[in-house]
Amino acid sequence: MTSTITDFTQYTDLRRAAGQNDPGALREVAEQFEALFLQTMLKSMRDASIEDPLFGDSDQMETYQGMMDQQLAVEMASGKGVGLADMLVRQLGGVEANNLDGPRDSFPIPRSKPPHQTEQAWSDPLEFARDIWPHAERTAKQLNVAPEAIVAQAALETGWGQHVIPGNSGATSFNLFGIKSGSEWQGDQVVRKTLEFEGGVPRPQNAHFRAYDGVAMAFSDYTSLITDNPRYSDVRDHGHDVAGFARALQASGYATDPDYAEKINQVSESPTMRRAMSELRAGN
């Protein structure tokens, strides 16, 4: 996310929404502002903490942690949030106070776990990499791309398995690649608040995502998506060129994040990936 609490265009958007007397628009912008505020707060807290000695300090890790903070901020701002959005809406006159869920004149302490957080199937990145590696190898062979590229994309989408989209039952959805359901999907699906980039600006949205019974089904569906959809024809046949695979994914419109390809590259070149690949090769 490129916007910060010091981006004064956010105030311009709020004033414009209030001037149009559009409660829906005002609520949306207020929630976006709250998410941006929470991301800034999380970044400040992380900057003041000691680095994790397991994964070390690197530009790649900093980028990845920033993405985690971004998604966590969206989760914390979901639903009632921490009250900042409500206060902005009331102050700007978009919604009367008695239309809200009670007075929110103070900032409650956020819960230790964000909404919808569930226990995931993997305890750490190395376990995640070990578990999905055989599936990544099969998928990579079918697509003629590097298996490391597949692992890197799954790691980027899920935070190395720590933030997989929860299913409706509370267990993981096993959606390792952030695939949305769409009208053609006949299987299970879950609704999740996420960030989509519009004109380079991230905006919180509710989206429908596919849910699977396990890792094998997730990889099978991903393989079918890249193989059968003409939109992704250029994603295939990159061999060991991870960067080329990542650029083709972004060019195909797989994700709206303008830095999606670069982030895949950073994950693929990160110390965590190198450590995982070293362990996997040693075990073969």
Image: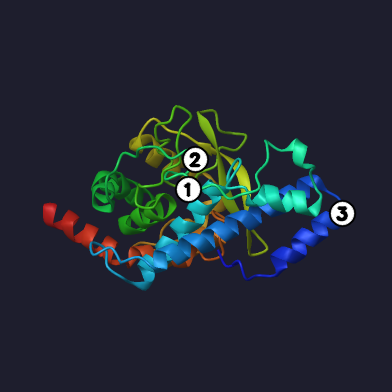
State the image coordinates of residue 200 (x, y, percent, origin top left): 63, 65
Quarter location, residue 17: bottom right
Alpha carbon of mark 3 to alpha carbon of mark 2: how far?
Answer: 32 Å
Q: Pick the quarter of the image with the N terminus.
A: bottom right
Amino acid under disc 3? Gln
Q: Secondary structure at mark 2?
A: loop
Q: Position of residue 52 (x, y in %)?
A: 28, 63
Amino acid type at circle 2 is Pro
Q: Nearer the viewer, mark 1 or mark 2?
A: 2
Question: Which amino acid type is shown beneath numbered disc 1?
Answer: Ile
The residue pinned by badge 2 equals: 115
Residue plotted at (46% across, 57% down): 69
Regarding mark 3 in the picture, which secondary structure is present there? loop
Whichever of labels 3 and 2 marks the residue nearer the N terminus, that label is 3
Q: Which residue is mark 1?
A: 226
Q: Which residue is mark 3?
A: 20
